[in-house]
Amino acid sequence: MNSELLSKIHPYIDTLISYLPGLIKAFLTFVIGFWLAKRVDKFLIKYFNGRHYDISLGSFVRSLVNIGIKIIVLITVAGMIGLPTTSLVAVFGAAGLAIGLALQGSLSNFAGGVLILIFKPFKVGDLITCQGESGQVMEIQIFNTIMITGENKTVILPNGAVSNGTIINVSKQGSLRVDIKVMVDFNEDIHNIRKIILEVLKRDELILKDPVPTVNIVGYAESAIIISIRPYATPDNFTFVQFNAYENIHQALIENGIKGPQIKRVMVQE
């Protein structure tokens, strides 16, 4: 009875032994592949944390890479144990294509978000002009960039359009120039006016000392000298410096008896 049983199972044992090296290789590939997926995930965690990227983006990229590695491992293991890998690849490819077509717009915005976070044309807190909107960047999400305008409006811009459009980053250099123009009478002493204005700018602690503020003649009008005043301020203080400069310069010119242009009108009698 035992010899008969052994004769029946002997072919199966031989088949198992013949497949055993391949199964061991497949098992080791499975274990090493999933271990590698964990190591890559830990590396990505350190990478994103070290560069202060958006948390949502880091989580999404980690999941995407982790799933991709595991799919490759499973397909490789399936090939080692003799399963038809061509069919599996075709199924995964068709599913990926369908998902890609369904999420075409979202994928474009995701790719735009990745480009923004990698190349950093702006960061959170910067003042930018983009897609016809101007404001401070409050958040860079996976699919959108959120800004607050000067009127305290929330603007949500799709990252695809942002990354492919023109971006004006007014905070990039660390300082902004305030441009102010005043007109004084043609007969006034420009050297005295420059001294008065520079003294006003010097007293304002919000105005940067470097670059140095400038006061220059930029043109002439009817009975008037046009003076350009250019102090510099940080992006956060820009509005305050502008308003203060207008008010303080006007007050100083009045106190020092500086007159505006005296426009003469000639009456013609017919």
Image (spheres, rainbow, N blue to C red):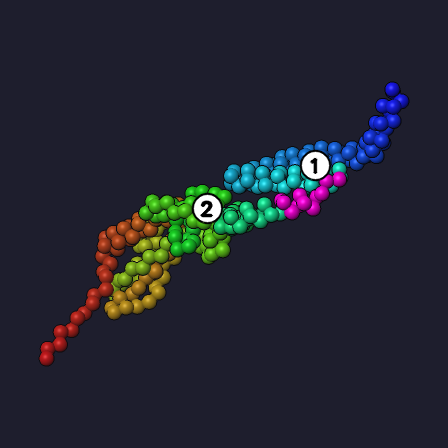
Q: Does the magenta stretch include residue 12?
A: no
Q: Say which of 243 and 156 sits in front.
A: 156
Q: Say which of 210 and 4 sits in front.
A: 4
Q: Is residue 185 left or right of residue 101?
A: left
Q: Where is residue 8 in the image (x, y as percent from the top left)?
A: 85, 27
Q: Position of residue 149 (x, y in %)?
A: 36, 47
Q: Can residue 102 be seen from the camera position used here?
A: yes
**Which mark is drawn over residue 144?**
2
**Which mark is drawn over residue 19?**
none
Q: Which region of the structure is painted magenta?
A: 82-92
Which mark is in front, 2 or 1? 1
Secondary structure, magenta segment, majority class:
helix
Q: In which quarter of the image is the C terminus?
A: bottom left
Q: Say which of 101 and 10 sits in front.
A: 10
Q: Does the magenta stretch include residue 90?
A: yes
Q: In this view, does 42 lie to the left or right of 188?
A: right
Q: Position of residue 235 (x, y in %)?
A: 41, 48
Identify which residue is drawn at 21% across, 65% down: 262
Q: Alpha carbon of mark 2 to alpha carbon of mark 1: how far?
A: 34 Å
Looking at the rendering, which quadrant does residue 3 occupy?
top right
Q: What residue did someone put label 1 on? A: 33
Identify which residue is drawn at 28% across, 68% down: 221
Label 2 environment density (alpha carbons within 10 Å; few <14, some 14–19, many ≥20): many
Identify which residue is drawn at 62% across, 44% down: 92
Identify which residue is drawn at 39% across, 55% down: 132
> Which amino acid, by three-letter code, is at mark 2?
Asn
Q: Can residue 172 be seen from the camera position used here?
A: no
Q: Is residue 259 left or right of residue 219?
A: left
Q: In this view, does 36 lie to the left or right of 172?
A: right
Label 1 environment density (alpha carbons within 10 Å; few <14, some 14–19, many ≥20): many
Marks 2 and 1 close (CB-CB < 8 Å): no
Element type at marker 1? Answer: helix
